[in-house]
Image (cartoon, helix red, strand yellow):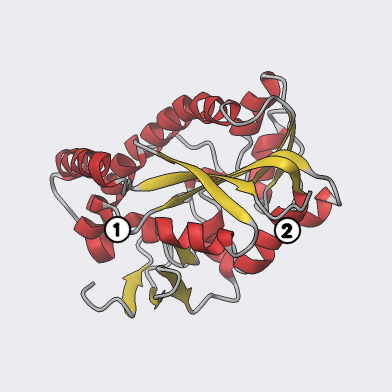
Amino acid sequence: MSNRSKINIKDYSVSKENFDLIYNEELDMYSTDPIPQDIEKYYLSDNYISHTDSQKGIVEKMYQLVKSYMLRKKLRLISNYSAIGSLLDIGAGTGDFLKVAKNEGWEVDGIEPSAIARNHAATKGLILKEDESGVGEQKFDVITMWHVLEHVPNLQHQINWLADHLDKNGTLIIAVPNFNSYDAKTYKEFWAAWDVPRHLHHFSAKSIKTLFSKNGFEVIDQKPLIFDSFYVSLLSEKYKGSQLKFISAFLNGLRSNVKANRSGEYSSLIYVLERTDFVE
């Protein structure tokens, strides 16, 4: 990865195809090239567990265990910036986060393109919208995108839409992987959070701040997702074909967090944003 202008990455999870990552120096961001016209087929796999509630193997069990713990932690984070009100979760998956929020008194809505995931959510009493058109002109006190922005084909359209649907005093929560993390630099082309071609964009802290500041938003806080380094390291060890993947993954995940405690470059970061473009 010495040449930043272009990196070649394999889709280890589903198709085994190779894709290029093209670097944008101004934004400090990579974009996947080419973007497949039939992108939906790259999500049709049991390996894509955020669209299922699978607990078949140890990786899936670990994912679901951590997810369960993080649901309330995410809600507590939001409560630091917003009183209970209306909440929209974009890329809501199987609806677990919205279910927890609803039980705590939030008025919830969700968008989820995957029919499989929406069907899982329906069994939990949540009717998710397939796309943005189902939301209409409604505005929300809080909009969340947990590991979703990297999947969005048209970033400018998405940011414009967020600006139109976030209340004047609302809070936007964005969580994305960070390619400047220690685990990303350690695993290089095997880093699982590249996740091409499902991840169309690959962000640094500079990427998020630059993109959103150009569109009337300000990053007011930044928080780590501590567990991501361990989960991503485990998948990365699997992609490398490591024989000691659990030990190596734990050690690299731990190192990543220890180093990030000083640098701030965690495996994944949560950005808390507010609107700055309202004229009184």
For the residue pair 21 and 276, the one nearer the viewer reads as: 276
Circle on res. 161: 2
Q: Earlier in the sequence, mark 2 or mark 1?
A: 2
Are the two marked residues, 2 and 1, in contact with CB atoms closer than 8 angstroms? no
Point out residue 201 in the picture as x, y percentages from the top left corner: 48, 65
Q: Residue furthest top?
A: 104
For the residue pair 264 and 199, the one nearer the viewer reads as: 264
| Amino acid at dot 1 | Trp
Point out residue 247 in the picture as x, y percentages from the top left corner: 15, 39
Whether residue 140 sits left or right of residue 57 in the image: it is right
Assign a secondary structure to mark 1.
loop
Query: Dividing the picture into quarters, in which one does residue 217 lie?
Result: bottom right
For the residue pair 14 and 203, the one nearer the viewer reads as: 203
Which residue lies under the disc numbered 1? 191
For the residue pair 107 and 233, the one nearer the viewer reads as: 107
Instruction: Give the label, 2 or 1, closer to the camera.
Output: 2
Alpha carbon separation for disc pair 2 and 1: 31 Å
